[in-house]
Amino acid sequence: MENYELLENRFGIKIPLTGSYIQGVYQSNVITTIALTLFFYVLFFYKLSSILKTFKAKTLFTATAIKRLNHFALFNLIGSPLAFVLIHFAIMKHTTFRDLPTYLLHLILGVFILFIVTVFKKGYQIQAENDLTI
């Protein structure tokens, strides 16, 4: 028993127990946009989880933590605008700036992470000096 119908570029998904359909348009650019957005956020949360793992470590201020924070900041500062331009202008062919606040939040997050990186660099330096005196 099939619960969907595909006619030309339109699809209909049958809702069980109601007999009605949800109808939509099947377009490859929409599917590509959804896939790229999911891929972007999979990378985003993977990098975020690697940062959170460093916070659970015994020593907080390490070169690895600084490197991971830098990667996350650059991912937000460079990857987010690239994804924005690619999805909205190249794939979806939009002429207006849609979802601009989302990408501005990524840019603000990237700048904030860069401030945290400077704090971690100073903490790493102080920790290294402290380890040398002990």
Image: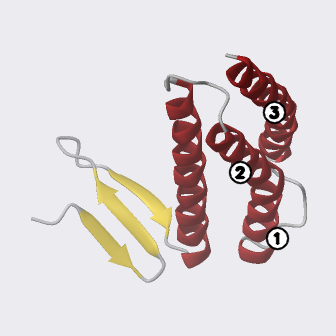
Q: Which residue is mark 3?
A: 121
Q: Marks 2 and 3, how far apart in space?
A: 14 Å
> Percent from the top left, x then y, of residue 80?
76, 54
Circle 3 — which element?
helix
Q: Amino acid at mark 3?
A: Lys
The quarter of the picture where the N terminus appears is bottom left
Tell me how many marks there are: 3
Name which of mark 2 and mark 3 comes first in the sequence. 2
Q: Amino acid at mark 1?
A: Phe
Q: What is the quadrant of residue 13 in the picture? A: bottom left
User: What's the residue at 74%, 62% (across, down)?
Assistant: 83
- CB-based contact (under 8 Å), mark 1 and mark 3: no
Q: Nearer the viewer, mark 2 or mark 1?
A: 2
The quarter of the picture where the C terminus appears is top right
Which residue is more in the foreground, 83 or 46? 46
- CB-based contact (under 8 Å), mark 2 and mark 1: no
- Residue density around tag 1, few if under 14, some if 14–19, many if 20 or more, within 10 Å: some
Q: Which residue is mark 2?
A: 71
Q: Which residue is mark 1?
A: 89
